[in-house]
Image (spheres, grey):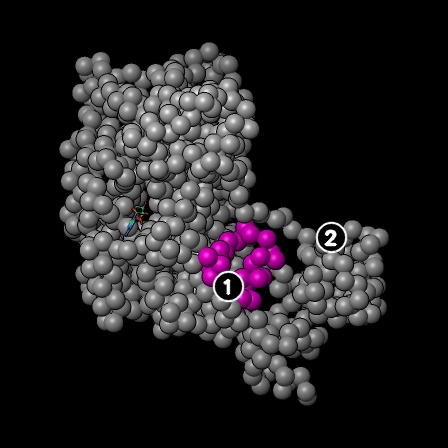
Amino acid sequence: MAEAEFIQVGMRVAVPFGKTKIFTGLVFSIHQEEPTAYKAKEIHQILDDEPIVAVRQLKHWQWIADYYMCSLGDVLRAAIPTAFLLESETLVIKNETFQQEDILNDDEYLIYEALQHQSVLKIQEISKILNKKGVLSVINQLIDKGVVVLKEEIFQQYKPKLIKYIRLNEEYKNQESLSQLLENLTRAKKQREVILSYFSFQAQTQKPVKLKTLKEVSNASSAIINVLVEKDIFEVYTIQTDRILFDKETNGLKELSVEQNTALAQIDKSFKKFDVSLFHGITSSGKTEIYAHLIQKALDEKKQVLYLLPEIALTTQIISRLQVFFGDRISVFHSKYSINERVEVWNNLLHTKSKAQIILGARSSVLLPFSNLGLIIVDEEHETSFKQFDPSPRYHARDAAIVLAKIHQAKVLLGSATPSVESFYNTQQKKYGYIKLDRRFGNVLLPEVELVDIKEKHRKKRMNGHFSDRLLTLIQEALENKEQVILFQNRRGYSPIVECTTCGVAPQCPNCDVSLTFHKYRNELRCHYCGYHRSLPKTCPACENPTLDTKGFGTEQIEIELQGLFPEAKIGRMDLDTTRGKYGYQKIITAFQEQEIDILVGTQMLTKGLDFNNVTLVGVLNADNLLNFPDFRAHERSYQLMVQVSGRAGRAKKRGKVAIQTFNPHHQILQQVTTNSYDEMYKDQINERHIFHYPPLIRLVKITLKHKDFTKVNNASEWLGKSLKNNFHENVLGPTSPAVSRIRNLHIKTLLVKLPKNRSIKQSKQIIQNIKNSFQSIGEFRSVRFIVDVDNY
Ligand code: ADP
Ligand code: ZN
C-alpha cells in the first residue's frame, strides 16, 4: 500500500471511533504486530505530509508517562495545541481578516461560502457540505491559509497602559547649566514657570512626574510643554520603555562584574563535567544577566534554548528584560495563549526557525517539539509551581526538563537564591555541579533582618491590631523617605475563621470539610477550595446568638488596618482575590513599579522574582503560621519564602530592612533566615529527612481516592492499604483523611508509599500499577477515583 510507505511516526491520522465519530490520532510507532485485544480498524486518512511531533519528543513523553504513572494520552493532551487535534466536536469560525478568495480550491471555497451564512460550523456539518467523511485535512488547510480559526477563548498578551512621564534633560542636571537655562528663559515667562513648577513638585514628591500632573500643577497648556520638549529641555518617557532605554548604551549584553564573570566561568567549567548544574546566587546577584550571557553563547552555537519560569503571568519583567537583548528570537509559550500563537511557536520550533531560538515558558513548554536544544535554564528552581497537581500528567517540569536535556544532550542550569533541598542534595552527591555567587550586584548589602517578638509586644501592650510598634515605626520611616514597603501575609481574605464566641462553632462550607473565610469587602463567607460563598450571617448558625467574631487574620484585614494607621498612604493588595481579573497581576505590579502604591500587602505571590528598586522595607506579619504548616517541607518552604520576600528589599542603592513578627524568635529557621545560613538550614533539614525517611532520601508516591459516598471510599482505602502493605510493609502510610477531607462533596482518603531504596523504582511502580488494576477490577470500587501522584512534595 502506498500509505504504508508514506506514513511516519509523529504524523496525524484520522481514525474512526464507533459508527460516526472521527478522532485525530498520532502515529506513535509503525509495526506489523496485529493487536490481540481488539480488532484493528483502518486509518481513515493521513492528515500530514510530514510529522508534526518529533521522535525525540515522543521519547520524552513516553518517559513522563512511565515515570509519573499516567497514560501517554494524558501527556499528548497536555502537550499538543488543540488545533492539532480536530475532532467531531470542534467548532470552526471564519477568520474575519481573510480576503484572498482566489487561493481557495473547490472544497475550501464551499466551506468559506458556508461560513458567510452561518457563523459556526461543526466538523460533521462540514462533512455534510462536502459530502465526504475525510474533512480534517481540508480544515487543516483552511487553518493554514488563514481562512478559518477554531472557536476558543483567547488570552491576550497584556499590554500595559503606557503612562507618559516627563523629566528634565540630563544636560540641566547640574546647577550651573540650570541657572543658565532659567536665565535664557526670562523672556519666555510661561516656559520658565513650567520648569519651576516641575522642580517644586519633584522636590516635594521625589517621584517621577507624570505629564498629566505637570500640566495640572503648572497650569500650563500642552502647547507650552510641547515647546519645551521640542527644545530638548524636557523629555517625555514612559516607565515601561524607560526600563529598556537603560540599556541603550550597552547595546546588547550587560558587562558583568568581576564576581559575575567568575560565576560565568565556573558555570562553563561545570557544564564540561556535569549535565546539570545548580547556580546558587543570592537575591539580586544578577542571575538574569548571567543567564543572558549563557543564552547568547548557545545561540552562537546555533542551538535552541528553553528558559523555564515557575509562572509566566508574574514574569513580564523577565520577558521584557530578555527581549531587550534577544528581540524577536524569543517566543513566549503559555498554555493560555491563543491556539494560533501556540501553533506558530510549535511550528517554528519544529522547523528550527530563528523566531523560536529561545522559548520562554512555564511548565508545559518542556513538552514542545525542540529540534536542536542546547541549553535549559530553570529559573527559581525551588518553586513548587513547577509541579503539576491536576490534571494528569502530574509532572515536575524541572525534573522533566532534566530528562529532556539528556535526550538532546543539552546542558541544564538550575538557578535559585534558595535551592530546593533535593537539588542541593544532588550537588552533595556529586550528581550536579554547583556554583555559588554570594554577592549582590553593585555590592548592595543583603537586607538586615530583625525579629520582632510579638509575644513580648502583646504582653507590654505594644501591639496595634496586628502591628507591633516596631514595625509601625519602620513603615513610618520608609514612607517619610518616599520609599516603598512590602508586607507579607500568607493568608488572603479578612480573617480565615469566623467563630461564635458563645458556642465556639465556626461556619463550615457545605461542600468541603473546611471553615469558611470571611471577606469583609463583600461581607461574605467564602470557601477557598470550591468557591462556595454566602453573606455573613447575623447570628451563629448553631446557637443563634449574635456573637460571631473574627479570629486570625488575612491580607484584606491587614489592608484595612493599614488604611486606618496610615490614612495618607496608598495601599495595594496582591493576592488571589485581587489578581483574578484578566491582567490582575500586571496591573498591580505596574502600579507598584510606577510608585502609585506606597505599601503593597500580599501573599506568596510577592516573592516571585520581582525586581522593584524603591522598596527598602519588607515586613512579615506572622512567621509562625508558615512554620507550623503540617508538612515535612514546611521548614524548608518557610526559609525559602522568607529569604525570597526579604530579597525584594534594598535591591538598588540603599541597604534594605526586613522585620519578621513572630511568637517564636528563637526558632532555628528564623535564626537561619536572619543570618542567611542556607547551609545550616540544609544540614538540619537533610538530617530530619534521613531520620524520618523523606525525600530526597526516598521517593514518595501519593495515592488519593475520592468518592461522594464516605463508606465506599473508606472501604476502598482499607482494601488498598492492605494490598499495599503486603508489598511495601512499613513503607506505607495511611490510609488517612487529609486536613481537608471533603472537597466539592467528594470524600477523600490518601495513602503514601515510600519507595524503598533496595528495590528499583520501576519495579515498585509496576507493583503499584498492578494493585491499581486489581482495585479497579473490583465492581464495588469501580466508581472510586484513583489518583496516583509521583514525587508529590
Ligand atoms: P537576581 O535575578 O539574581 O535576583 P537580577 O538579575 O534581577 O538579580 O539583578 C538585580 C539587578 O541588578 C537588576 O536590576 C539588574 O538589571 C542589575 N544588574 C545585575 N547585573 C548587572 C550588570 N552586570 N550590569 C548592570 N546591571 C546589572
Ligand atoms: Zn467548599
Q: Is residue 18 above or below residue 116?
A: below
Q: On the image, which quarter does residue 18 sit in?
A: bottom right
The local secondary structure at tag 2 comes to loop
Q: Name the residue under label 1.
A: 355
Q: Name the residue under label 2.
A: 96
Q: Residue at x 24, y 20 (%)?
A: 473
In the displayed structure image, the side of residue 509 where residue 24 appears, left or right = right
508 in magenta: no
Name the residue nearer the viewer: 55 or 571.
571
- Type of amino acid at the residue the image marks with label 2: Glu
Asked whether residue 555 is in view, the answer is: no
- Percent across and percent down for residue 38 are 62, 75
N-terminal of the two: label 2 or label 1?
A: 2
Name the residue nearer the viewer: 347 or 190.
190
Question: Neighbour class for label 2 at 10 Å: few (<14), some, many (≥20)?
Answer: few
Asked whether residue 143 is in view, the answer is: yes
343 in magenta: yes
Q: Which residue is drawn at 76% across and 62% down?
A: 100
- How far apart are the two marked residues, 2 and 1, measured between alpha carbons? 26 Å
Name the residue nearer the viewer: 180 or 400.
180
The magenta region covers 327-350
Q: Is residue 53 above or below residue 682?
A: below
